[in-house]
Image: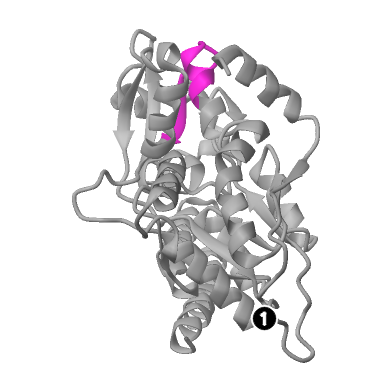
Amino acid sequence: MNRRTMLALAVSSLMAPWSVRAQPAPASSTSPTKNARVIKEVRFGVLPLGGTVESRALWTPLMADMSRALGLPVSAYSVPSYEELDRAIGRDEIDMAFLSAKMALDAVMQRRMKVVAQIARRDGMPEHRAVLLARKTGPLNTLEGLLAQPERWRLARGDSRSVTGFVVPQSQLFLPNNIEMETRFRSEFVGTHQATALAVANGDADVATNNTTDFERFRDQFPVEAARLQVIWESEPPPGAPMVVRRDYPPEFQAKLQAFLTGYGKGKGTRADAEREVLKDLRAAYGYVAADDSALLPEARLEYQLGRQRAMSAAWVNDAAREQRLQRIEKAYAAQVEALKASSASR
């Protein structure tokens, strides 16, 4: 499929969310215990990477292998935005998902989901970081120029639920420089990492939030457009994106799903070689490791810091009002930490 065809399919797929079913195994070996929820299929929420067609295509091989391992049909719930995926989780239309750390934290604190795995990282491998992209030949080509006059520039950013597309740039760069991403720029466009990079490459925006992993994928898919771009800022490593599953699903099923994910690509032979190729396409070359809700503690800390930054920079009627807001932030953060640590202790 050439780049223009892929773009056309991706654009047409934005019209409505849709799903595709992976080939099921003949029978399930996950036997429900008495009074346990009977699972007939697994609806896998796909975090938007580019268009819905592209996102679904990347995950289809893993879903097919998951279907065989679990003995259940696995369908992709692929949507074009974080917001639509968030709403689907709220409507209980998603059984498991690969989510941004912020979306996962929200779902876990609402008691809808629990963390079962996250991408494995190894010493020496490139670290996943948030970045800002600008055109090499555009009027804006330095970070200093951006921070000095944000009102001059058009921003392309991620959804507020995106860690690298919004949360990290806001907390690590913009708020410390007294810049609110939502209000200080000349205009803003909100989209996927692919869409924000294209906006800058094509001259529709001056600066874009992105991340090293998705920009690497963008270079592979859009080499001409990527050659026009440069990185003008790079963050500290942000919290990783986890795999989550519905909390009300039987422990036996959750354990089987976790075993599949952590064992995927770890064996020997032609099948394991094929699995490792799937993982490379998903930018998870070393597979997945077991995790629980405590994996979200770094994200909770990041949200806490962002909340405090906003409270300190906002205008208040008096100091007492600001202090009340700060106390609420402290209380909410303490409750999150307690809940996330409780999950780890109960493993």
Q: Position of residue 110 (x, y in %)?
A: 67, 71
Residue 149 seen: no
For the rendered model, the colour scheme is: one colour
Numbered range of the magenta stretch: 197-210
Q: Position of residue 118 (x, y in %)?
A: 44, 61
**What is the residue that sits farthest to the bottom in this orientation?**
34
Looking at the image, residue 4 sits to the left or right of residue 9; the answer is left
Would you place residue 204 above or below residue 33 in this image? above
| Residue at 60% from the left image edge and 27% from the top image edge | 189
| Residue at 66% from the left image edge and 76% from the top image edge | 30
Residue at numbered disc 1 = 250
**Is residue 203 covered in magenta?**
yes
Residue 309 seen: yes
Q: Position of residue 343 (x, y in %)?
A: 50, 82
Q: Position of residue 213 (x, y in %)?
A: 39, 38
**What is the residue that sits farthest to the left in this orientation?**
124
| Residue at 50% from the left image edge and 43% from the top image edge | 166
Looking at the image, residue 273 sits to the left or right of residue 127; the answer is right
